[in-house]
Amino acid sequence: MILSRLKWPCVAIALWFGVGLLMAGCAARPPRTVETLVTVEVTVPVVETQVVAVTREVEKTVVVTATPEPTPFYVSVINAPADTLVYPLAGDPITLDPQEAGDELSGLVVQQLYEGLFNMRGDGTTVPAAATGSQVSDDGKTYTITLRAGMTWSDGVAVTAQQYVDGVCRLLEPAIGNNYYYLLTDIAQVVGAADFASGEVADCQTVGVKAVDDLTLVITLRQPASFLPKLLAFRVFLPARLDVINAGAGIDALSPLATPSATATQSAIRNPQSAIPSNGPYLLAEQAPADHITLTRNPTYWNAAQVAIDRVEFRVVPSPVEQLAQYEAGDLAVADFPAEETARIQADSGLSRELQVLVRPGASYLAFNTQITPTMDVNFRRAVASAIDRRALIEDVLQQPWRQAAQAIVPPGIPGYQGEDPAVGYPYDPAAAQAYLAQAGYAAQNPPPPVELWFNREGNNELLFEAVGGMLEQIGIPVRLVSSSWDVYLAALDGCNKPNRQDATQTPAECSYGIYRMGWVMDYADPAGILDVVFNPKSAFQYTGWQSEEYQRLLSEALAEQDETRRAELYRSAELLLLNDAAVAVPLQYYDRTLLVKAGVTFDYPPFGAPNLQYWTLPESLSE
């Protein structure tokens, strides 16, 4: 914990004493007991009268009692210039290539540089972006999208429908390796997309995404998909500039950004605007790995007059402790914070006003490698699921009691949510956990082999999974925690599962994790967005090695089903199969978006996807 930036209210006592004592007396942290008085020993001069009527000064120790000031130590201030938003990143984006961006950090920055067809606003509504509207055919299989006229890239090249076709083709290319190809091949079921993505067909002209003319895009599906309009606002429909890419510069040179070693990459970092044209609200101005990424307003953007913030500095601050310290000092406009600071933030009248808890449908979960011992045994997996006290993780470890424990995987607010049904998933029950462990063939005299639990160490994960490891060890499961940074972690997991792709390197059976941590924030409001996109055995987003023809049948029927009641029944059956019968995953908690945002900052966080900072504003009155 960094305390040096705190502005203490107890200035009446100008004497040094221990920080721990000062914290106890000056910064209340409910629900702990807080003393209202601070006792300090000081040495002061006093006057002592002698018999001979001569006075002299001697030193004597006395006790002085002081009452701390009740005012909070936090005062909201923004130190950046009035035109600059300083926004933290928990790590370096893996890439700024719009078709390679498959992780949240990369997606946040890419969202500002490239204009998709539609944008989602904070209230969940979808608004036109590069597109002005769309029409669907009577059979529900063909969508016609019209682009707005007059748009240009930052280098003056016209924005065309063909560039959006090229973007889809690049995202589907096996060599690109973007796991979101699955949204187009198996969820939306775009004609020809699966064959092209698998490498069976080499020509993207067979894919059902066509440019009829410069301003008209047509998407053809194998079957009706009533949820497709929700996907049109997601970054699978970002454009690509093949002329820049094929020239061997620009986007290719800047991907991945986290390890810029080549001369071309270093050159692009010094003068990126000449190498990476943008059609979105911002331009890439500067990128320094492990430090910052700076964006500036794009004057050629079609809606540039409505973009209020001229400059965005994405500052790499991996630690929530340091994010909070920089936020309190006025150096960040937005911040995450460590779990152990939650009570102090809620108790502080200044910080609590800036604490935001926003809708963000998603779930954090553990999942199992079903291909190795001991996690290949379904009863062993049930034992793990029954050993985890979700409420303790939320209240005692994260100290965020407003969060909702998850026993089902489909989050609240999504059709088909059944988290209130106790029959879905496994509740915390140590006795049942012991019984399942015995059914798997293990006991105190015959313990299971150590299980590797993999997780990424960003945020509060180290605290969280140390606690999870302790819970499993209490029922007799030895655990080895293995953590790494997000980019290393994701690359290691991706190496263990690339189904239906020519670039597959390993299978879960060849990887050492027994349990892995993952979270999924929904990309659109449909149960397929997690039950199918993440847990379908064909998906590249899960690393379990689990196979189930029945699960795939249920999902396939649900995608094609037009009756919403029947569709919900199919997804309910699929969720029960995933969590109960096969016990492939253990939901931990449902997500929200909990963060601090400076007073006066107008923010717009959509429930799905990354925020569009073009809709934000800054308060000049708080700037210094």
Image (spheres, helix red, strand yellow):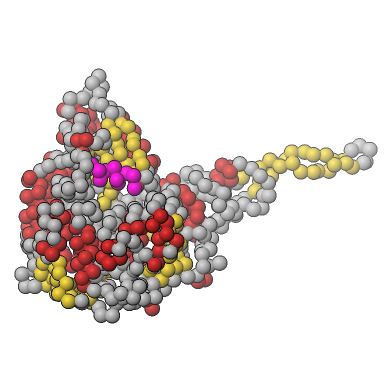
**x and y percentages locating residue 573 in the rendered image:** 10, 49
Residue at the image position 24 percent from the left and 26 percent from the top? 448
118 vs 448: above or below = below
**x and y percentages locating residue 552 in the rendered image:** 9, 49
Q: Image quadrant of residue 560?
A: bottom left
Residue at the image position 15 percent from the left and 64 percent from the top? 227
State whether residue 335 appears in this view.
Answer: no
Of 547 and 46, the residue lying toward us: 547
The verdict on residue 488 being magenta is yes
**x and y percentages locating residue 531 in the rendered image:** 17, 51
Residue lying farthest bottom? 150
Residue at the image position 22 percent from the left and 76 percent from the top? 147
Is 48 situated left or right of 413 in this image? Answer: right
Is 31 situated left or right of 558 in this image? Answer: right
Of 201 and 383, the residue lying toward us: 201
Q: Image quadrant of residue 447?
A: top left
Give the mark count.
0
Give the overall secondary structure of the magenta segment.
helix
Q: Quadrant of the C terminus?
A: bottom right
The verdict on residue 48 being magenta is no
Residue at the image position 31 percent from the left and 31 percent from the top? 479
Task: Please state the extent of the stretch shown in magenta in the rendering.
Answer: 487-496
Is 39 situated left or right of 506 in this image? Answer: right
**x and y percentages locating residue 423 in the rendered image:** 16, 44
